Image: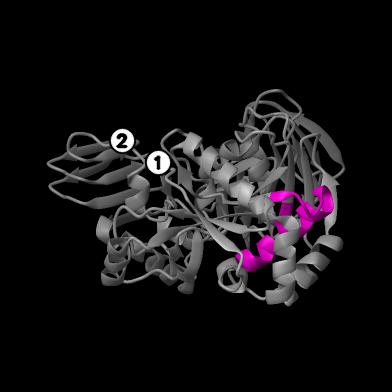
């Protein structure tokens, strides 16, 4: 049997400001309106005989992952979520997921290791490549998927090949070296996709990186398991054990050291969608080479990618730019410098700027909130609670809150009182009061929350009960 493992991690810093720590690259939509993650899931589900899919992702992204998968039509598949308490790079993720598959389905199960944030346009060719790789994996090979390069690309890693065998992995080269690689015909782009028997990979890791394997095995054994629903099973890896796994990529830890590594040449319309320049190529362009998303106006403009989440963005007399406007940040970058957006992200992170980490809109298991305004001693939010959503029973040490319902019906606990609020009705929650809101209806519920106090950070919260296991 083939068990796809989707690795959904990383920030995607080169796609800032759309990608951030709390809303990373796999959740970004592409031209078909679906996220990169959902597209990856649907590709995996399209393979013959798939009954189970494993996704390894950050603990904080679990509810968003489940929400994405709810949009898939493949309702017969069982989803296993492995939640990383901390990021330890792809070697630890591979070890944890492979160990999980071996425990659940046996060491002879064939693992198909997929990145959640890649774009593949030719699904039929992808399916054929997987069939080829799985056949080799059955014979004890560790298989990687190499992409025929159509240009010298400095943003991708390369694999030097001799026929179907991998000779060596090469990190992202400079432009002259990349040109040499393409001209030689002996180098393929490293797609980051792999296929192997679970037992074969575990044996290789036991030889080449036993400390990673041991830490990941213990993290699985000591992990917390729960059933979210009939389709979604969740295992949260033990943090103390997982932290003992060295932080290193699977290429360095295993792939560069094994002798049974083969390469499937995959002409599948692949892109890692790593920059605004590469993302723009996934969209159709007009006669001037422009792609415009949202409220935009372009005059005498060529070969530009423009995306607006709300307000009008206008360009006049420019070429070869990517312009991305979100609610709280705007990026303007030359397409040929789009790799350097990572440097900007690192600067924002180093400066402690909130825009590197989060949006004004935050997503939670029960729905979402959007910061509308804030200043000294106050903050105003719009809170949207999905049908059946319920905030935790909680209190705050530093702030009071005033809730006004503007849509739907809220069932509220406020201290000793239990009240029902309809549209245009409100309640005041004094600092320290235990409180909760719930949407028991079939339509979304929306309220405006006004916070006042000496400290208004999201971490000023004490949870007593929570249906999502966060207390």
15 over 205 or under it: above or below: above
Residue 36 position within the rendered picture, expressed as x and y whole percent measured from the top left = 51, 44
Residue 161 position within the rendered picture, expressed as x and y whole percent measured from the top left = 44, 64
Is there any visible trace of residue 237 in the rendered image?
yes
Residue at 21% from the left image edge and 51% from the top image edge: 320
Q: Secondary structure at mark 1?
A: loop
What's the distance in space between the residues labelled 1 and 2, CA to CA?
Answer: 19 Å
Q: Nearer the viewer, mark 1 or mark 2?
A: 2
Q: What segment is highlighted magenta in the picture?
A: 82-110
Q: Is residue 90 magenta-colored?
A: yes
Q: Is residue 183 magenta-colored?
A: no
375 over 92 or under it: above or below: above
Q: Which label was assigned to residue 332?
A: none
Q: Which label was assigned to residue 309?
A: 1
N-term-proximal mark, 1 vs 2 = 2
Residue bearing the label numbered 2: 284
Residue at 61% from the left image edge and 42% from the top image edge: 368
């Amino acid at each position: 049997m083939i068990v796809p493992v989707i690795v959904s991690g990383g920030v995607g810093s080169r796609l800032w400001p759309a990608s951030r720590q709390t809303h990373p690259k796999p959740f970004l939509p592409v031209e078909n309106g679906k996220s990169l993650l959902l597209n990856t899931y649907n590709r995996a589900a399209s393979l013959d005989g798939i009954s189970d899919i494993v996704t390894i992702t950050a603990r904080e992204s679990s509810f968003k992952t489940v929400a994405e998968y709810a949009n898939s039509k493949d309702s017969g598949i069982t989803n296993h979520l492995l939640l990383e308490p901390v990021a330890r790079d792809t070697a630890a993720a591979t070890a944890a997921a492979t160990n999980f598959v071996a425990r659940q389905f046996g060491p002879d199960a064939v693992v198909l290791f997929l990145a959640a944030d890649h774009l593949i346009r030719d699904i039929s060719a992808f399916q054929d490549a997987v069939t080829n790789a799985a056949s080799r994996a059955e014979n004890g090979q560790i298989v990687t998927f190499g992409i025929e390069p159509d240009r010298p690309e400095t943003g991708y890693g390369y694999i030097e090949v001799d026929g179907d065998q991998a000779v060596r992995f090469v990190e992202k080269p400079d432009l002259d070296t990349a040109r040499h690689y393409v001209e030689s015909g002996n180098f393929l782009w490293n797609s980051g996709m792999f296929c192997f028997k679970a037992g074969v990979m575990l044996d290789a890791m036991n030889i080449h990186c036993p400390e990673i394997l041991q830490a990941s095995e213990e993290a699985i054994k000591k992990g917390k398991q729960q059933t979210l629903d009939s389709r979604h099973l969740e295992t949260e890896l033990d943090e103390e054990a997982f932290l003992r796994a060295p932080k290193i990529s699977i290429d360095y830890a295993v792939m560069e050291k094994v002798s049974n590594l083969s390469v499937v040449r995959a002409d599948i319309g692949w892109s890692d969608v790593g920059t605004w320049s590469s993302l723009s190529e996934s969209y159709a362009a007009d006669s001037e080479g422009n792609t415009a998303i949202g409220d935009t106006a372009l005059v005498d403009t060529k070969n530009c990618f423009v995306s607006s989440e709300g307000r009008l963005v206008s360009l006049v007399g420019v070429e070869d730019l990517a312009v991305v406007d979100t609610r709280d940040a705007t990026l303007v970058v030359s397409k040929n410098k789009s790799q350097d957006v990572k440097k900007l992200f690192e600067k924002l992170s180093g400066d402690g700027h909130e825009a590197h980490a989060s949006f004004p809109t935050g997503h939670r298991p029960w729905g979402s909130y959007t910061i509308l305004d804030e200043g000294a001693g106050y903050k105003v939010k719009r809170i949207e609670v999905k049908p059946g959503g319920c905030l935790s029973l909680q209190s705050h040490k530093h702030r009071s809150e005033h809730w006004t319902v503007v849509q739907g019906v809220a069932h509220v606990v406020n201290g000793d009182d239990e009240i029902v609020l309809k549209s245009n009705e409100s309640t005041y929650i004094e600092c320290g009061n235990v409180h909760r809101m719930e949407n028991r209806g079939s339509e979304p519920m929306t309220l405006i929350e006004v916070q006042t106090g000496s400290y208004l950070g999201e971490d000023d919260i004490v949870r007593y009960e929570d249906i999502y296991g966060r207390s």
